[in-house]
Image: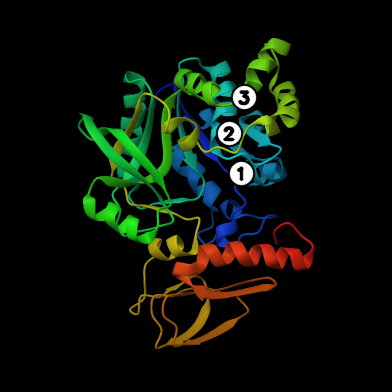
Amino acid sequence: MTTRSDNDYCLILAGGKGQRLWPYSRESYPKQFIDFFGTGRTQLQQTYDRMARLVAPGHIFVSTNIDYVDLVRKQLPEVARDHILAEPVQRNTAPSLAWAAYRIAREDAKANIVTVPSDQAVMDEAAFERNVHDGFAFVSAHEGFLVMGVKPTRPEPGYGYIQLGDPVEEGFYTVKSFTEKPERQFAQVFMDSGEFYWNTGVFFVNVKTAWEELTKQLPVVLRQLDNINFYASPDQEESYMLEHFPSYPNLSIESATLEKAEHVHVMRCSFGWADLGTWHSMYESQQKTGDDNVVVGSDVMIENSRNNIIKLPKDRLGVISGLDGFIVAEKDNVLLICKKEDSSALIRKYVNEVALKKGEKYV
C-alpha cells in the first residue's frame, strides 16, 4: 500500500451525457450513473472507490452538469456538496479542470491533481495504484502535465493516441504528438509502430501549473471573480459560475493545454484499461463466451453467432442466430441492432433522428 500525500487531490469528471452508449445511456440518466454490469456499483461509484484508496476521500472533487448534481449526491453521499462542481452547460474537460484547480488552490496552493474520467475499466488495480503514486511523485518534481498512456491491444479508432518522444526517466517520456480518434488504418499504423500509446484521459498536474496554463488558453472567468470578490465562498463562487461558465469554449484538456504547453509528459502504464464509453469498448473489456460473444445480464439463446455484445431487459428472451460482430441492445422504448464497428456514427445519426421525432434533445 502506497503512502498518501497530504497534497494529493483527485478530480472525477462525471458530466458527460453518455450518447455513445445509447440506448442504454440516456441524457436524463447517462452511463456514469448506471450499474451496467450488475456489480452493485455504478461507474461513478467504482471510480470513487478506486480513487478513495489513493487519495484522502476529503480531497476528491466531482465535476458534473448541474442536472446531475442530485444523482452524484445520491450515489456519492461521502462527497461534500462544496466538492461537487455543478456546471450549467457542457464545456468539455479543460474548463472543468480550470474550475477545479481554482477551487482546490483555495484549499492547498501546493496541491497535485489527478483528473480521471468516470467511465473507465481498470483490470489491474495494484498496477494502477503504483502508477498513480509514481504520477503524483513525477509532477511534484517536474513542471508541466503528465498523462497516463497504455500500450494499444488493437487498432481502436475511437481512442486518442499519444506518440512517445524522448525519455525523461524510467517509464516517463516527453510527448511528441497527440492524435484524437484516427481512422482505423492510421490506428493500425500507430499500433504497429510501437511509438504510440492510448490516451487514457488520466492527467496529473500541479495546481499552480494547471492554473497558469489554463488561464493562457481560456477566458479569464475566474480571475474576474477574484476582482469582484477574492474571498467568495463556494456558494458565491457557484452562483457566479452559473452565469459565467458558459463563457468558456468547448475545449478538451488535450487541445487547450497538452498540445500547447511547453512541458508535457507521458507515463507508460500497463494496468489494463478500457474506455467504457462505447459499445465496442464494453465488448473488448469483458470476458467472452466460447463463441466470443459478450452477454450482459441477459436471457438469450444463441447459435451460429460470434463477436457480439448483447444486453436486453430482464423480462426479455433473445433468440439470436447468424450474427457476427453486432450490438443487440434494448432499453425502454428503443431496440438497437447494428455492427459494432459502425456503432459510433450510426448512434450519432439515430439519436438525433429519434429525438427529433419525439421532440426531445436526446432520448
Query: In screen coordinates, is 327 left or right of 173?
Result: right
* Residue depth check, mark 3 versus mark 1: number of the one nearer the observer: 3
Q: Which mark is residue 355?
A: none
Residue nearest the observer in this picture, 276 or 295 = 276
- Of marks 2 and 1, which one's residue comes earlier in the chain? 1
Residue visible at 28% across and 49% down in the picture: 151
Residue at the image position 75 percent from the left and 64 percent from the top: 356
Q: Position of residue 322 (x, y in %)?
A: 44, 88
Counting from the top left corner in percent of width and height, residue 239 is at 76, 27
Q: Is residue 53 above or below residue 347?
A: above
Residue 150 in the image: above or below residue 361: above
Q: As drawn, is 352 to the left or to the right of 359?
A: left
Quarter where residue 177 is shown: top left
Residue 78, visible in the rendered structure: no
Distance between mark 3 and mark 1 Cα atoms:
21 Å
Residue drawn at (68%, 30%) of the image = 247
Residue count near mark 2 (Cα–Cα under 10 Å), binned few <14, some 14–19, many ≥20: many
Does residue 6 sit above or below 272 in this rendering?
A: above
Residue under circle 3?
A: 219
Circle 1 residues within 10 Å: few <14, some 14–19, many ≥20: many
Q: Which residue in the protein does label 1 denote?
A: 15
Q: Nearer the viewer, residue 362 or 356?
A: 356
Q: Which residue is mark 2?
A: 96
Q: At 49% from the left edge and 64% from the top edge, which residue is drawn?
A: 279
The way the protein has been coloured in the rendering is rainbow
2 or 3: mark nearer the eye: 3
Q: Secondary structure at mark 1?
A: loop
- For marks 3 and 1, the one nearer the N-term is 1
Q: Nearer the viewer, residue 192 or 67?
A: 192
In this rendering, the answer to whether 158 lies above or below 223 is below
* Amino acid residing under circle 3: Pro
Distance between mark 2 and mark 3 Cα atoms? 13 Å
